[in-house]
Image (cartoon, rainbow, N blue to C red):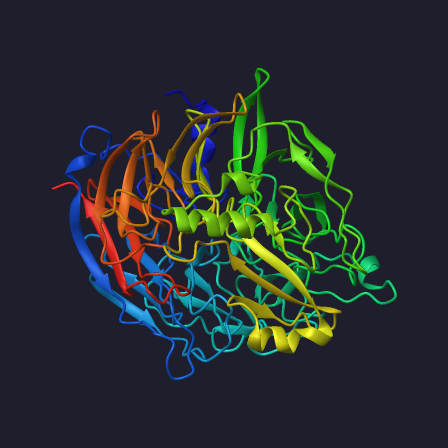
């Protein structure tokens, strides 16, 4: 497949040697594309385990600790593989054998109240051009920890860099309304020029006035604060009665080193399901924004959801690419969110490349709430997840389950996507882990294809008046209750599952792998991904997945993420499954690939999910290669 010469040159400039994987998404813009071709569509079926590595870091949730998950995507630079564990230990491995070279333990507080459980998705690296080869901390490894610290390590030795902050670390706790345990980091920092940029993960729905979701940049050498940017505009926060926080950037950021821009995906303003104390659009929550890397000033912003009432945040990382559109090359940023919509925006202005229309959506009937009258809906590409379901569409493995699902759907307020939360209970579709999650997507620049896995798990959402909340939490139906303290309403939500089989009440598939032609703005192919129970043919394929894909020049898509324990390879042209490799448990992580001494490896972390007690836990990093 063709690739313009200037694109090849740019790709090489920002990724280093072709066999490396130096960032979470390989290149700074997060395409998750590898130019490696040794493993291809003809020989991928011969892949076998080359080595495994056990971190030893697992928490089952006992002893006051949170349950752990292994969601790391390693990086490979300078011939060394770097990864993090759920306990924030940073480990360097020999990429040929999986043998440990060094390990650094920041000794986190494992009882820190982390809403996502004990997880960390990776590290970032920076090469100091002012230091001579062989000098300590010329190559630095940066990690943001779950207990809110930023740490710089010497890549060669694993020792803390003494000139960074205090003994190699700085505190990230100096934010408005900081509260121990509500505020943590799970994603790798972003590095551009000589600054390290961090967002934050902030617990959902606990209060109206949660910690600030400020994004900050620190000097890569000294750790000094260079700039900060607050996603909630100060003029909003100054309004009388305004109470909110968060809008934080908890997912992975992307970088355009040529334009000196960093692209930040932001989440929901607090709390997620009642916005009466944060009137208006709440910019720049639930957006993708471009910030000047040197100053932190806003270059442009595009809001994907106005006045979010559904937890439809920008969980997916932005993806920086160049598309052919209307006969010319267009630099773009691609951003999806939990709605299943995909937005293709000009990298320079933030304006949509494919049209986006403001369309009317249902009004809220909750006293004190004013929902946005419109939402931005892309004309193309089409949504990658369903946006409506009727009671007549109810699905069940048995007639009893189907009828129970039909009755429950019939009792909910249900006007399709953007049906506001209500006091009687509303249906949120595709749900809080529906559409595009943090799993994100991968882009093949030669084919113009974007590949993504998406979910469809509708959720019941209900607001409960404050004077009824304590009794409802004690005596009400099973599910998740959170207080939303400071507002007139608590919140209840749960996935819409059948009572017997505990499968989604909506027609399958519930998990899909899709290839989108971004030249035409159309879907090229779409196939179910994974299975709830491969041993039961009555359960259709297509299962909820958390962990994204990568693509290679060998014509392959690699993806795990499903609750069944496999890493799979698909033909990028057709979506045909070509191979699946057994894992010790589910791999809720994004794989990566690299080449060392002429041999290509594909690596995936397999640890089970921190929120699914029934899933087997593991601490295994698995590397596959050709025999």
Residue 362 position in % (x across, y down): 73, 43
Q: In which quadrant is the C terminus drawn?
A: top left
In this orientation, does residue 159 appear?
yes
Relative image position of residue 10 (x, y in whole percent): 47, 33
State whether residue 398 is above or below residue 98.
above
Residue 292 x, y percent position in the rendering:
66, 48
Q: Position of residue 18 (x, y in %)?
A: 33, 38
Apparent side of residue 568 relative to residue 49 in the rendered image (left or right) = right
Q: Residue at x 32, y 52 (%)?
A: 78
Q: Is residue 370 left or right of residue 305?
A: right
Residue furthest to the right in view is 240
Q: Nearer the viewer, residue 617 or 233?
A: 617
The N terminus lies in which quarter of the figure?
top left
Up-down relation of residue 392 to residue 522 (above or below): below
Q: Is residue 43 left or right of residue 86?
A: left
Q: Is residue 281 above or below residue 486?
A: above
Is the residue 491 above or below the residue 259 in the image? Answer: below
Quadrant assignment, res 101: bottom left
Residue sitting at x 58%, y 30%: 331
From where the camera sits, is residue 438 visible? Answer: no
């Amino acid at each position: 497949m063709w690739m313009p010469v200037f694109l090849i040159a740019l790709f090489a400039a920002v990724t280093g040697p072709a066999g490396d994987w130096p960032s979470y998404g390989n290149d700074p813009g997060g395409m998750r594309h590898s130019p490696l071709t040794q493993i291809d569509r003809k020989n991928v079926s011969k892949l076998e385990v080359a080595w495994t590595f056990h971190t030893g870091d697992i928490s089952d949730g006992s002893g006051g600790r949170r349950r752990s998950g292994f969601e790391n995507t390693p990086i490979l630079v300078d011939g060394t593989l770097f990864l993090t564990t759920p306990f924030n230990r940073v480990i360097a491995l020999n990429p040929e054998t999986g043998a440990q070279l060094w390990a650094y333990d920041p000794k986190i507080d494992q009882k820190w109240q982390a809403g996502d459980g004990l997880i960390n998705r990776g590290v970032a690296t920076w090469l100091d051009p002012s230091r001579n080869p062989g000098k300590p901390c010329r190559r630095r490894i940066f990690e943001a920890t779950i207990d809110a610290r930023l740490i710089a390590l010497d890549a060669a030795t694993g020792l803390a860099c003494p000139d960074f902050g205090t003994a190699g670390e700085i505190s990230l706790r100096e934010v408005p309304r900081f509260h121990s345990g509500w505020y943590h980091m799970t994603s790798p920092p972003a590095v551009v020029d000589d600054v390290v940029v961090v967002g934050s993960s902030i617990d959902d729905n606990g209060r109206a006035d949660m910690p600030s979701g400020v994004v900050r940049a620190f000097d890569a050498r000294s750790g000094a604060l260079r700039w900060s940017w607050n996603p909630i505009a100060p003029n909003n926060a100054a309004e009388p009665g305004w109470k909110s926080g968060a809008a934080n950037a908890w997912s992975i950021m992307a970088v355009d080193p040529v334009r000196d821009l960093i692209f930040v995906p932001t989440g929901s303003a607090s709390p997620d399901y009642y916005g009466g104390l944060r009137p208006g659009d709440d910019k720049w929550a639930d957006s993708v924004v471009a910030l000047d890397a040197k100053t932190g000033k806003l270059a442009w912003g595009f809001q994907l959801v106005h006045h979010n009432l559904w937890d439809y945040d920008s969980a997916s990382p932005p993806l920086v690419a160049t598309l052919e559109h209307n006969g010319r090359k267009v630099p773009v940023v691609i951003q999806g969110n939990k709605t299943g919509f995909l937005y293709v925006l000009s990298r320079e202005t933030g304006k949509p490349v494919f049209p986006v229309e403001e369309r009317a959506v249902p009004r809220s009937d909750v006293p004190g709430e004013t929902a946005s009258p419109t939402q931005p809906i892309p004309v193309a590409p089409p949504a990658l997840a369903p946006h409506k379901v009727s009671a007549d569409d109810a699905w069940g493995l048995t007639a009893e389950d189907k009828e129970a699902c039909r009755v429950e759907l019939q009792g909910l307020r249900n006007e399709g996507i953007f049906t506001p939360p209500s006091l009687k209970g509303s249906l949120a579709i595709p749900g809080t882990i529906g559409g595009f999650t943090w799993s994100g997507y991968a882009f093949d620049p030669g084919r113009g294809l974007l590949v993504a896995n998406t979910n469809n798990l509708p959720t019941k959402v209900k607001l409960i008046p404050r004077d009824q909340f304590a009794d409802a939490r004690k005596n009400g139906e099973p599910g998740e209750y959170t207080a939303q303290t400071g507002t007139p309403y608590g919140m209840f939500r749960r996935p819409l599952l059948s009572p017997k089989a505990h499968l989604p009440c909506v027609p399958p598939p519930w998990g899909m792998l899709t290839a989108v032609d971004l030249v035409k703005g159309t879907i090229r192919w779409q196939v179910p991904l994974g299975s709830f129970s491969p041993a039961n043919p009555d359960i259709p394929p297509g299962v909820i997945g958390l962990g994204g894909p990568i693509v290679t020049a060998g014509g392959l898509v690699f993806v795990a993420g499903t609750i069944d324990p496999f890493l799979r390879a698909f033909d990028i042209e057709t979506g045909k499954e070509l191979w699946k490799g057994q894992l010790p448990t589910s791999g809720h992580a994004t794989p990566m690939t690299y080449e060392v001494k002429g041999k290509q490896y594909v690596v995936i972390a397999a640890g089970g999910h921190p929120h699914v007690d029934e899933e087997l836990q593991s601490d295994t990093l698995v590397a596959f290669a050709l025999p």
